[in-house]
Image: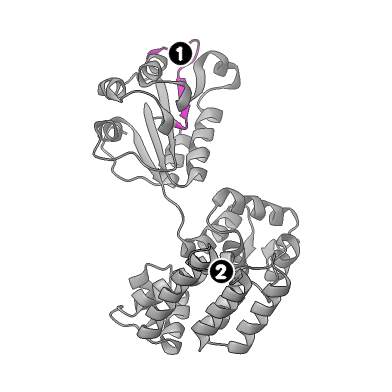
Amino acid sequence: MAEKKTSITFELVMRDLKARTFSPIYILMGEESFYIDKISDYIADNVLQPEERDFNQTIVFGSDMNAAQIVDLAKAYPMMAEKRVVIVKESQDLHGNTEFLEKYLDKPVSSTVLVFCHKNGTIDRRKKIVGKAETVGVVFESKKKRDYELPGFVENYLKQHKATIDNKAAVMMADHVGSDLSRLISELDKVLISLPQDRRVTPDIVERQIGISKEFNAFELRNAIINRNIFKANQIIKYFDKNPKAGSIYSFLPLLFNYFQNLMIAYYAPNRNNENSVAQYLELRGGWAAKDYVTGMRNYTGMKTMQIISEIREIDARSKGLDNPNTGVRDLMKELIFFILH
């Protein structure tokens, strides 16, 4: 890995690690901690044999160390092993300037695997340490999954565990749990344990195992709104009103905002009546994924879409107490749905 890397995927990092191609430096950074933890845990569990770790593996936290101390750890040579592993958790809290690390990266110790886990943000790529790390090792940015990517993530995770899932069930799971991948996987593992022999996840299984109603959930509310089905939307809102745990304004506001935001963008697609064209413009996985936006453009004008986006923002602010002394979240929920559908 001597060539400079400006962008690298989780799959590529893991492929090299599993092939036992280790770099002297890994900077793992970003908003999504799931992939950072997966990579650093794999390194901790697989670079060294269990009997080699006592003397050759050090895991520290950035808040307890400074850059000079990390360099000292990295410069040490392994004892009765081929490699030495140094993992810095929460490295965003590391004390001191990075000058020592920059100098170390001019000539890193080849027998050391040095890992920085920088969470809840990224290091400015204009800084020397990033450029030098890219030249001699791996810089990986772990980005949050966008909402439309989550059903695909669900499908791929289950496929890795020799299971399949209905598209509706995948969207139900994604909408219910959201973009917290650790929690999403925890829920998927719960479903996997109870799968029947055909190992197919259906909406009925999701409803039974996760506690999401297959008829009254944020996914079905979104569908009703897309198709401007006033009766169905009101049914779901009434259900939410009586069963707050099933859905609330906080669970479907982001869902609706993302949909109408993308719908507004879809109006600028070169051929907005063609599902494949819209899918390509919105960077969706295929024409089927754009069907909701083509339907939405039939049911909502561009002007109405802009008004809905503005209303969602206002309702979101009011739900948090801004300029809203009296109206409860349930009434705000009803007010928003009425505005969208009329």
Q: Name above or below for residue 324 compared with residue 181.
A: below
Is label 1 in a helix, a strand or a loop?
Answer: loop
Amino acid type of the residue that numbered disc 1 sits on in the rendered structure: Pro
At a point 64% along the width and 59% down the height, the residue shown is 163
Q: Locate residue 137, reporting x and y percent.
A: 33, 32
Quadrant of res 280: bottom left
> Which mark, residue 185?
none
At a point 48% along the width and 79% down the height, the residue shown is 292
**Is residue 116 in view?**
no
Taking 161 as reference, is 142 left or right? left
Compare residues 256 and 25 and report the one nearer the observer.
256
Q: Locate residue 200, reporting x and y percent.
A: 68, 64
Residue identified by numbered label 2: 252
Residue 70 part of the magenta segment: no
Residue identified by numbered label 1: 78
Q: Residue furthest top?
A: 79
Q: Locate residue 60, reporting x and y percent.
A: 50, 23
Q: CA distance from mark 1 to mark 2?
A: 53 Å
Q: Locate residue 287, reporting x and y percent.
A: 43, 76
**Is residue 45 in view?**
yes
For the record, the magenta segment spans 75-90
Coloring scheme used: one colour
Tag 2 or tag 1, which sits nearer the N-term? 1
At a point 68% along the width and 79% down the height, the residue shown is 238
Compare residues 264 and 312 and report the one nearer the observer.
312
Residue 86 part of the magenta segment: yes
